[in-house]
């Protein structure tokens, strides 16, 4: 079996391409967990955060900001890693079932499309302020926040490289 193909098949470039799989998961009453981010330089903090989020349900979906979206949010020098490489890396994680790229600055439309059972973000957000809170609450879903691992952030890693480079 081609392992790389299995990983690549988890990456969705147009949300509509996920429709049939989402319908299948819903029919099987799978609990769908959703989180999103730029994941520019994937590090231990991301891995622990995403693994914890995935443990909350049966299927883990990551909404991934495209390069242009990341640049608008993080600045002209970001992302460091291109969107396809970031998607491939995230899709290679055993606990990730789907990575969907989105162009907008927020994943609101994507969350509305996916209709997750659980929406997860970092604890630097109040649940009510998380994009998609209204969508998930309206369907009877849950919003969860997870603490970050101290000392791990893409921005911090980039600054360290710049200081030591």
Image (cartoon, helix red, strand yellow):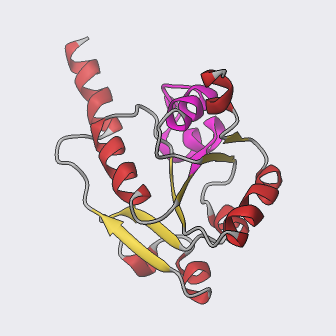
Is 41 in front, or is 12? Answer: 12
> Up-down: is 128 above or below 48?
below
Q: How many marks?
A: 0
Front in this rendered view, residue 156 or 115: 115
> Is 102 placed left or right of 72 in the picture?
right
Farthest-out residue, front: 1
112 relative to 143 in the view: left or right? right
Residue farthest along the left direction in this orientation: 150
Above or below 139: residue 88: above
x, y percent for residue 140: 56, 88
What percent of the width, then of the height, locates residue 119? 49, 69
Q: Residue at x 51, y 30 (%)?
A: 89
Point out the stretch of residues depicted in magenta. 62-91
Residue positioned 40% across, 34% down in the render: 42
Residue 68 is inside the magenta segment: yes
Hey, which quadrant is residue 104 in on the image? Answer: bottom right
Report if residue 72 lies within the magenta region. Answer: yes
Q: Looking at the rendering, in which quadrant would you find the N terminus?
A: top right
Q: Quadrant of the C terminus?
A: top left
**Left or right of residue 74: residue 48:** left
**x and y percent of residue 14 in the render?**
79, 47
Q: Is residue 92 above or below residue 164?
A: below
Residue at 35%, 43% (x, y): give it.
46
Could you tell me residue 131's position as x and y percent? 53, 70
């Amino acid at each position: 079996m081609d392992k790389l193909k299995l990983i690549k098949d988890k990456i969705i470039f147009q949300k509509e391409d996920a429709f049939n799989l989402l319908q299948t998961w819903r029919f099987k009453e799978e609990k769908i967990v959703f989180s999103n981010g730029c994941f520019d330089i994937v590090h231990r903090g991301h891995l622990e955060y995403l693994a914890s989020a995935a443990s909350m349900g049966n299927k883990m979906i990551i909404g991934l900001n495209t390069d242009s979206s990341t640049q608008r949010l993080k600045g002209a020098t970001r992302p460091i890693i291109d969107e396809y490489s970031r998607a491939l890396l995230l899709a290679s994680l055993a606990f990730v079932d789907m990575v969907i790229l989105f162009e907008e600055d927020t994943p609101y439309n994507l969350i509305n499309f996916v209709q997750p059972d659980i929406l997860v973000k970092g604890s630097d957000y109040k649940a009510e302020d998380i994009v998609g809170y209204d969508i998930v609450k309206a369907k009877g879903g849950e919003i969860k926040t997870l603490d970050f691992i101290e000392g791990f952030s893409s921005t911090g890693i980039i600054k360290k490289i710049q200081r030591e480079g």
